[in-house]
């Protein structure tokens, strides 16, 4: 399909009225619009990139069902996230190997862009929504098995740097081209800095799954921000108004504007109504859009997110954060940190486009040169 798409493309402080030409599934050219072009179709954005996503539409990526994986991916694709990593959660080694193999097939088919493993090598006291009975000490042998099962599709693994054996696991992962992410960790600030100036280059959902920062005990939060400030790492933010206060998001984007990656940490309830769901082996209840471990109290640990990435962009653009800055954090930068060729609005890039109205509600989504919606 060859076509021209005209829209307002965000730049710092404003928009450019541009025409993007699409041919054979890629962007063939971009030029300023003229009076002879068709009317603008709205705000024109590159496809969003979510590198931390457990599911949506009532379906989970932590699955061996190709149908369930397809449902979860489709919900996010239709909402403008044209590239995503499918995230696992802590489970038994045998189950993880099966899930990773199924996700590798989905990646080989082009449905997802790869796999992110969150667990099982996490700090018990910072486990969040991970089954404490299934957490394991870092095991290089198991890491090698998981890498092999992923068939080159494992892109990121979250690891608590302070655990004995973490360095050996990190070595296995980096040797296989896997990005090591610091997360679910009680590491000291110095441990975090050392890890992020060594094997690690990403921080899994900064602030969540780690002790709060204190001025005499800075911990992994300030250690991570210090590493981000000198360009050693990018930090994920779940900017949905549940995991982080909006002012926290604004502050981090002001402190390390070139190192922020927006992620959803979405689970099966993304795009769905309140109800009862699963996150891996754990039961989850969603009330008023907030997912928590079902523990009988209604106050269990937050268990993933229910937003889609465009929801976060829209939320913070409405609060006054520059749209061009938000889009880098939701497209080009997450792709770059995990080595994906995505999120680019430039000639030669895959034609992943999102058209929105003035309120940043998606109206049409293109993935690989094909419209997903009418």
Image (tube, rainbow, N blue to C red):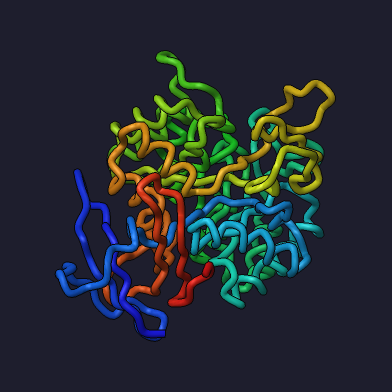
Q: Work out whether residue 115 can be spotted.
A: yes
Look at the picture and state if 223 lies above or below 122: above
Q: Residue at x 47, y 26 (%)?
A: 245
Q: Is residue 348 visible?
A: no
Residue name at image x 81 percent, y 59 percent = 94
- Residue at 74 percent across and 63 percent down: it is 68
- The image shows residue 374, relative to residue 183, as above or below, that is below
When asked about the image quadrant of residue 342, the answer is bottom left
Q: Residue at x 31, y 33 (%)?
A: 320
Report the front residue among 263 and 203. Answer: 263
Measured from the top left, where is residue 244 in percent x and y? 50, 29
Residue 51 falls left or right of residue 45? right
Of 291 and 139, which appears nearest the observer?
291
Horizontally, residue 285 falls left or right of residue 163, namely right
Would you identify the image quadrant in which residue 192 lies? top left
Numbered disc total: 0
Quadrant of the rendered structure where residue 313 is? top left
């Amino acid at each position: 399909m060859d076509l021209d798409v005209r829209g307002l493309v965000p730049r710092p402080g404003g928009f450019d009225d541009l025409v993007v030409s699409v041919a054979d599934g890629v962007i063939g050219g971009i030029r300023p619009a003229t009076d002879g072009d068709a009317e603008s179709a709205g705000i024109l954005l590159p496809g969003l990139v979510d590198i931390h996503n457990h599911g949506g539409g009532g379906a989970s990526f932590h699955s061996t069902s190709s149908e369930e994986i397809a449902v979860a991916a489709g919900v996010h694709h239709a909402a403008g996230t044209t590239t995503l990593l499918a995230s696992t959660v802590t489970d038994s080694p045998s189950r993880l190997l099966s899930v990773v193999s199924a996700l590798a097939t989905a990646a080989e088919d082009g449905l997802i862009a790869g796999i992110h493993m969150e667990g099982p090598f996490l700090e018990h006291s910072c486990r969040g929504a991970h089954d404490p009975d299934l957490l394991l000490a870092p095991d290089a042998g198991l890491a090698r098995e998981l890498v092999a099962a992923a068939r080159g599709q494992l892109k990121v693994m979250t690891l608590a740097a302070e655990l004995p054996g973490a360095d050996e696991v990190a070595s296995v992962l980096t040797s296989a081209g896997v990005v090591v992410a610091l997360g679910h960790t009680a590491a000291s600030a110095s441990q975090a800095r050392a890890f992020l100036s060594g094997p690690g280059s990403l921080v899994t959902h900064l602030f969540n799954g780690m002790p709060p920062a204190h001025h005499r005990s800075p911990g992994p939060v300030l250690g991570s921000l210090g590493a981000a400030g000198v360009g050693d790492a990018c930090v994920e933010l779940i900017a949905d108004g549940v995991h982080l206060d909006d002012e926290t998001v604004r502050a981090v984007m002001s402190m390390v504007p070139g190192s922020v990656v927006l992620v959803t940490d979405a689970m099966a309830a993304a795009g769905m109504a309140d109800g009862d769901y699963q996150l891996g082996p754990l039961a989850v209840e969603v009330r008023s859009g907030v997912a928590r471990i079902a523990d009988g109290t209604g106050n269990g640990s937050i268990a993933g997110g229910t937003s889609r990435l465009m929801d976060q962009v829209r939320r913070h653009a409405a609060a006054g954060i520059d749209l061009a800055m938000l889009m880098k954090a939701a497209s080009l930068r997450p792709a770059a940190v995990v080595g994906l060729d995505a999120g680019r609005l430039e000639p030669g890039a895959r034609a992943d486009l999102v058209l929105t109205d003035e309120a940043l509600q998606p109206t049409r989504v293109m993935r690989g040169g094909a419209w997903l919606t009418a």
